[in-house]
Amino acid sequence: MKIQIRNGRVVDPASGVDRVADIFIAKGHIVGIGNAPHGFETSGSLDASGCIVCPGLVDLSARLREPGYEYRATLESEMAAAAAGGITSLACPPDTDPPLDEPGLVEMLKHRARQPGFAHVYPVGALTLRLAGERLTEMAELAEAGCIAFGQANTAIVDTQVLARAMQYAATFGFPVWLQPQDPFLARMGVAHDGEVATRLGLAGIPVAAETIALATILQLARESGAQIHLTRISSASGLEMVAAARRSGIAATCDVAIHHLHLCDHDIAYFNPHARLDPPLRAQTDRDALRRGLADGTINALCSDHTPVDDDAKQVPFDEAEPGATGLELLLPLTLKWAAEMKLSLPQALARVTCDPAKILGIPAGSLKVGAPADVCVFDPQAFFKVSRETLKSQGKNTPFLGLELPGRVRATLIDGHLAYDGSWGE
Amino acid sequence: MRNPQLNAQGELQHLLTTEGLPREILTAILDTAEPFTEVAEREVKKLPLLRGKSVFNLFFENSTRTRTTFEIAAKRLSADVINLNINTSSATKGESLLDTVDNLAAMQADMFVVRHASSGAPHLIAEHLANTGKDHIRVINAGDGRHAHPTQGLLDMYTIRHYKRDFTGLTVAIVGDVLHSRVARSQIHALTTLGVPEIRVIAPKTLLPSCVERLGVRVCYDIHEGLRGVDVVMMLRLQNERMQGALLASPQEYFKSFGLTPERMALAKPDAIVMHPGPMNRGVEIDSAVADGPHAVILPQVTFGIAVRMAVMSMLGGAK
């Protein structure tokens, strides 16, 4: 299959390309930009006039809910959502049931996901067995099965000695360690940012210190173990400042932020909106502003959807009983564009945070439109707005605090390895 | 976003919290309660205002006292009262909160009086009723988690107005476990809305929620400083389980540091009143000499509580 994407504005942050050009695809790879390679014969073409043609998005956190939570989502439903969101590569956290702590599970997941039109799936293996924070997993085996990093999802390792050893062990093999910084004691029972809103609503708070104390521990152990650390879902200005300071002192830690924390703050809980029950909690407006700047200046390396489909039954309960998390695959691109517009960033600057930058963290050959790269491509109309609604979301999870919002950026087509994975009302 | 307890005309639709209610509505509730206090003095203690209406007392958390006062209030208004004590442990195993609500709504309920251990549960119910076309059913919050206990807050306002007449020159102290107290939050919002110029909260740091001063109060860690010159002392109940979880050292030390004693009451204005939402822990937060002393208005609070609950029910039940 040879495909030509015509007349689009090609934006490839990795190579600095930003011009109207045709893209030529053959055998699942990009074979030419601007000029057709010698002897290229188109067997299919897409008209991308007025659209942006960029690398398929790379999402650092998407829960696919398999195995174990198939009532919340399935690989089929979430892969359709990913394609509709222009996402072509994604990392999935290990908090499945059972957790990804055993090579067989990882192999099965990789096998199930290896279908045409499905995004490339990169499992993050469990750092400890059952994520219990007691015994190490067989990381070398898990890496062979396909894990690209090791982490604990949202579950902290309580025992600092276990954490230290897990990091040392991972560092032995050069495996990256992904950790969400939150002290489990300070976060105990907490459901919202410990501030004015939680006080007014009578919700148990999680102080910023829960993040900064965990960060101090992790960063100190990273320095001593030499482990390559990626910090997931930074939520506070103070936390961000610690990451920046650690980096200045020579610790090569990367970090990401979720779309929710980039756009919302604790005030968005409003009247106990269970969709705003997130982990980590939405913090104060000043925190959100710092995260927005941090992502723009590169202190935060990547933006992710933190996609967490939750069934209605687990959300239609009082706020403190609601399961944390929000669906996000289909909102990653629109919310990147919204952030870019509000921060007056150029498209290449903004798209880098959801393409080449997260690809670098994953260490995968994705997130670029260079000749020779896999043909993972997203074509979207930046001027087309749509309203987020339960009906428009393809994910089985309809749980998002952005319901009802008008967002820019409709995906017109998503190609994965040169296959048309999503065809969004082309020529509408 | 519209305040979920008001309808499009700005009238009270549900009573979920004292926060965000206009002063006119708070005052209207207190004014409406006024004549109801006399009903209790009559031989026939009944008014026909809610005749034919069904009030469901939906208690997901145990409470005898509050449930009883709501029951009395509803019965004095001639409503049919159905009491449901729903053990939360069985609720988690079985029916969901909203399934319960749907079932009771199908039984032609007119009003839900809800107590729940989770903050925001009455909001959830009110929103669900609106979403399912059942917004003729009124919701009264009888206490949700740490969030609100608006009828308690209002009966406290009634009590203050009864003894002090005017809110705008008062200094009010709230003493005790503000962190876990829905009563304190409802009191603070009502007091600020009604124009009380100085509200002090007196508690150790472990029993104060973060940024509490943003609710419009002054924080005092020293009870002597906090009580000096006050017109009203509002005591909060200290639950015994607070001694666990590293919030306090011992009941003895708490009483020594924050207990309301006659000596400390002497710092307040001579005509100051002492209130308590009950049940009291004598010797832990309050000395018996104060609880039974000349400043205490704790029993009148209970009486006024029925009138205030009648007022709220009649205003909601009478609304279109």
Image (cartoon, rainbow, N blue to C red):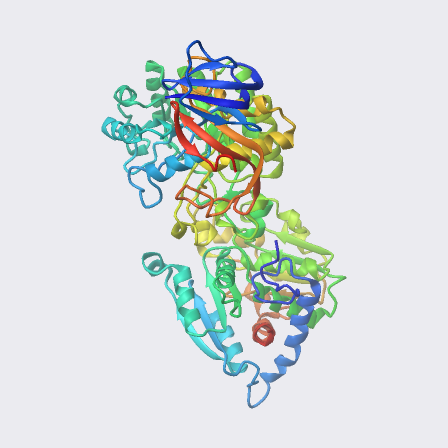
Look at 49% across and 56% down and name the residue there.
Answer: B145
Using the rendered view, name the quadrant where residue A43 is placed.
top left
Q: Residue furthest right?
A: B169
In the image, B128: left or right of B315?
left
Can the viewer see residue B270 in this picture?
A: yes
Q: Is residue B7 above or below residue A310?
A: below
Q: How many marks?
A: 0
Q: Where is residue A27 drawn, in percent x and y? A: 36, 18
Q: Where is residue A325 drawn, in percent x and y? A: 44, 41
Can the viewer see residue A205 in this picture?
A: no
Q: Is residue A75 above or below residue B2?
A: above
Q: Is residue A143 above or below residue A70?
A: above
The residue lying toward the viewer, choosing from A205 and B237, is: A205
The residue lying toward the viewer, choosing from B21 and A82, is: A82
Look at 38% across and 37% down and name the residue there.
Answer: A78
Q: Where is residue A353 drawn, in percent x and y? A: 52, 24
In the image, B279: left or right of B222?
left
In the image, A130: left or right of A250?
left
Q: Residue furthest top?
A: A38
Q: Where is residue A378 drawn, in percent x and y? A: 47, 27
The residue lying toward the viewer, choosing from A86 and A45, is: A45
Q: Residue furthest left?
A: A104
Quarter holding the N terminus of chain A is: top left
